[in-house]
């Protein structure tokens, strides 16, 4: 494979890592909103803490895709043709 392919593959892996992390945060926010809406429909005020967003290291795929993406991209930059 050429250097260009490694750079593209590394970039795609880094973007996928960011997308997965963003989707996790969106789902956490939607989940918390559904819980609050359920309490509000009953007329009670929930005593819930704010949204507990997932940490960066909670999902192994996010970390692995980012690390592999950086390594493959760097390999594409360093590799001599």
Image (cartoon, helix red, strand yellow):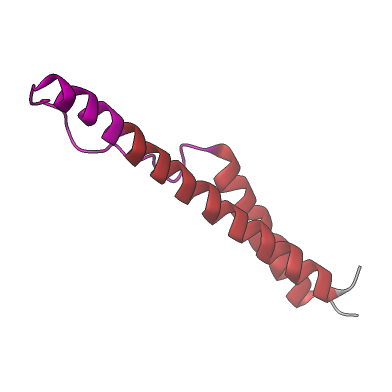
Can residue 75 be seen here? The reply is no
Q: Which one is in front, 34 or 72?
A: 34
Dominant secondary structure of the residues highlighted in magenta in the image: loop
Residue 19 in percent (x, y) is at 54, 53
Q: Quadrant of residue 15?
A: bottom right
**What residue sits 46% from the left and 37% below the top?**
58
Q: Which one is in front, 60 or 29?
A: 29
Up the image or down, 25 lies above or below 2; here it is above
Residue 61 in percent (x, y) is at 60, 41
**What residue sits 30% from the left and 30% below the top?**
34
Up the image or down, 66 lies above or below 53; here it is below
Numbered disc total? 0
**What residue sits 56% from the left and 38% below the top?**
60
Can residue 81 be seen here? The reply is yes
- The single residue placed furthest to the bottom in the displayed view is 81
Up the image or down, 13 lies above or below 64; here it is below
Residue 66 in percent (x, y) is at 59, 54
The C terminus appears in which quarter of the rendering? bottom right
Span shown in magenta: 32-59
Report whether 7 appears left or right of 48. Answer: right
Report whether 78 appears left or right of 37. Answer: right
Report whether 47 appears left or right of 51. Answer: left
User: Is 50 one of the magenta-colored residues?
Assistant: yes
The N terminus appears in which quarter of the rendering? bottom right
User: Is 58 one of the magenta-colored residues?
Assistant: yes
Report whether 36 appears left or right of 25. Answer: left
Q: Quadrant of residue 50?
A: top left
């Amino acid at each position: 494979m050429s250097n260009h392919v490694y750079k593209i593959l590394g970039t795609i892996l880094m973007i996928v890592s960011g997308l997965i992390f963003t989707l996790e945060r969106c789902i956490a926010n939607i989940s918390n909103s559904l819980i609050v809406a359920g309490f509000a429909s009953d007329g009670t005020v929930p005593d819930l803490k704010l949204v507990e967003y997932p940490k960066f290291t909670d999902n192994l795929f996010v970390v692995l895709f980012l690390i592999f993406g950086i390594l493959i991209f760097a390999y594409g930059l360093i590799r001599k043709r």
